[in-house]
Image: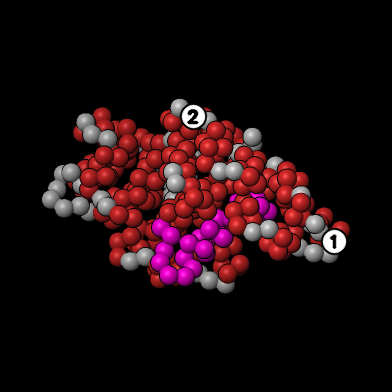
C-alpha cells in the first residue's frame, strides 16, 4: 500500500475481481504480512468515489455491506429511504435475520428501534412487518385459492372502496414469497384489467408507494428492478454516485444475477451498462465500477 498514489490501477484490479470469500482470505493475508488492516489502509490512502468502491468491495462481503448502507442511511439528519428499500425489501427471512444480527453486533444498535426512530405512522409499520422476517419461504408453493383471496383483498383495499387500506396491502406484499407475488400480480391484471403496478401508483404515494413497487417488482422479475434502479441512479450520476456504486456492488456479489441484470439493462435501455458507466464517469472511478460489473 505504501506509495499507493501511483498504483491505483493495481489496487482496483486486485480488489474488484474478488468474491466475498476471496476478500476474507486477502484481508487475512494482508494482516499477516503487514500487520495492518486492509480496510484502514485503503481509507487512509485514497478518498472520494474510489475509496467508496474499494471500501464496499473489501467490507467483508454482501452482509456487512448491507448493514453499512443501512447505518449510513439512518445516521445523521433525515433518512435515506432508498437505502432502506434497497437493503430490506424483497429479502428472504434468513437474509433479514442475518442483517439484524450483524447490525446489532457491529453497531450495538437494534434495527427495529432505529427504523421506529426514522420512520413514522403506516410506513413505520410496513417496515416493521418486513423486518419481522415472516415471509413465506421460497419453497412454499403457490396455492391458487390463496392467490384468489389475496387478489380480492387487495382489490377491496384499493380500487374496490373509497379510501385505501394501506396496511392490508403492505401485509400481503410483505408476507408472500416471490412466486406468490408474481401469481398475485398476474391474476390481478387478468381479473380486473389493470396492472397491480398501476394500482399501487394511483392508490399510494411517497415512500410507501416506492416500497410497495419495489416489493412487487422484485417478486415478478429480480433482474429488471435492479436494472431500473441502476439507471435511476445513473441519471445525473455526479449527485447520485454513492447510490449507484452501492447498487452495483450489491448486484456483483452474485455473478449469475449480475449477468441477468446486465441483460435486462440492455433489453430495457438499448445500451450496455458498461457503456453507460463509461459515458458518465472517468478515471479510477470508471475503472473500478467497470471492474465491479466484470468489464
The N terminus is located in which quarter? bottom right
Q: Main secondary structure of the magenta part?
A: helix
What SS does tag 1 mark?
A: helix
The C terminus is located in which quarter? top right
Of label 1 and label 2, which has the lower sequence position?
Answer: 1
**Magenta region: which residues?**
54-81
Residue 128: % across, % down = 40, 61
- Specify whether 145 is left or right of 237: left
Q: In this orientation, does residue 45 appear? A: yes
Q: Residues within 10 Å of mark 2 (few under 14, many from 20)?
A: few
As measured in the structure, the alpha-carbon distance from the residue carrying label 1 to the one carrying label 2 is 43 Å
Q: Residue at x 63, y 45 (%)?
A: 283
Judged from this view, the residue extending furthest toward the left is 162
> Who is closer to the viewer here, 171 or 198?
198
> Who is closer to the viewer here, 36 or 113?
36
Residue 10: % across, % down = 76, 46
What SS does tag 2 mark?
A: loop
Query: Badge 2 is on which residue?
Result: 271
> Who is closer to the viewer here, 26 or 8?
8
Q: Residue at x 52, y 64 (%)?
A: 71
Q: In this orientation, does residue 39 appear? A: no
Query: Badge 1 is on which residue?
Result: 34
Q: Magenta segment: does it hold 56?
A: yes
Amino acid at each position: 500500500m505504501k506509495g499507493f498514489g501511483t498504483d491505483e490501477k493495481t489496487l482496483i484490479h486486485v480488489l474488484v475481481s474478488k468474491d466475498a470469500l476471496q476478500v476474507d482470505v486477502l484481508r487475512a493475508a494482508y494482516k499477516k504480512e503487514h500487520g495492518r488492516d486492509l480496510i484502514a489502509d485503503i481509507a487512509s490512502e485514497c478518498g472520494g468515489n474510489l475509496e467508496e468502491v474499494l471500501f464496499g468491495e473489501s467490507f467483508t462481503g454482501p452482509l456487512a455491506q448491507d448493514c453499512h448502507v443501512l447505518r449510513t442511511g439512518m445516521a445523521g439528519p433525515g433518512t435515506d429511504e432508498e437505502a432502506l428499500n434497497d437493503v430490506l425489501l424483497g429479502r428472504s427471512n434468513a437474509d433479514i435475520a442475518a442483517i439484524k444480527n450483524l447490525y446489532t453486533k457491529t453497531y450495538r444498535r437494534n434495527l427495529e428501534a432505529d427504523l421506529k426512530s426514522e420512520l413514522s405512522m403506516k410506513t413505520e409499520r410496513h417496515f416493521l412487518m418486513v423486518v419481522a422476517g415472516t415471509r413465506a419461504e421460497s419453497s412454499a408453493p403457490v396455492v391458487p385459492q390463496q392467490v384468489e383471496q389475496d387478489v380480492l383483498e387487495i382489490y377491496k383495499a384499493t380500487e374496490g372502496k373509497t379510501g385505501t387500506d394501506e396496511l392490508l396491502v403492505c401485509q400481503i406484499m410483505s408476507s408472500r414469497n416471490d412466486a406468490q407475488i408474481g401469481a398475485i400480480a398476474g391474476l390481478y391484471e387478468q381479473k380486473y384489467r389493470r396492472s397491480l403496478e398501476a394500482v399501487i401508483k394511483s392508490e399510494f404515494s411517497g415512500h410507501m408507494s416506492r416500497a410497495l413497487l419495489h416489493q412487487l417488482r422484485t417478486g415478478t422479475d429480480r433482474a429488471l428492478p435492479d436494472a431500473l434502479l441502476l439507471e435511476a441512479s445513473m441519471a445525473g450520476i455526479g449527485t447520485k454516485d454513492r447510490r449507484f456504486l452501492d447498487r452495483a456492488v450489491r448486484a456483483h456479489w452474485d455473478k449469475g444475477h449480475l449477468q441477468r441484470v446486465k441483460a435486462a439493462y440492455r433489453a430495457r435501455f438499448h445500451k450496455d451498462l458498461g457503456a453507460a458507466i463509461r459515458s458518465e464517469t472517468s478515471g479510477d472511478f470508471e475503472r473500478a465500477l467497470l471492474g465491479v460489473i466484470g468489464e
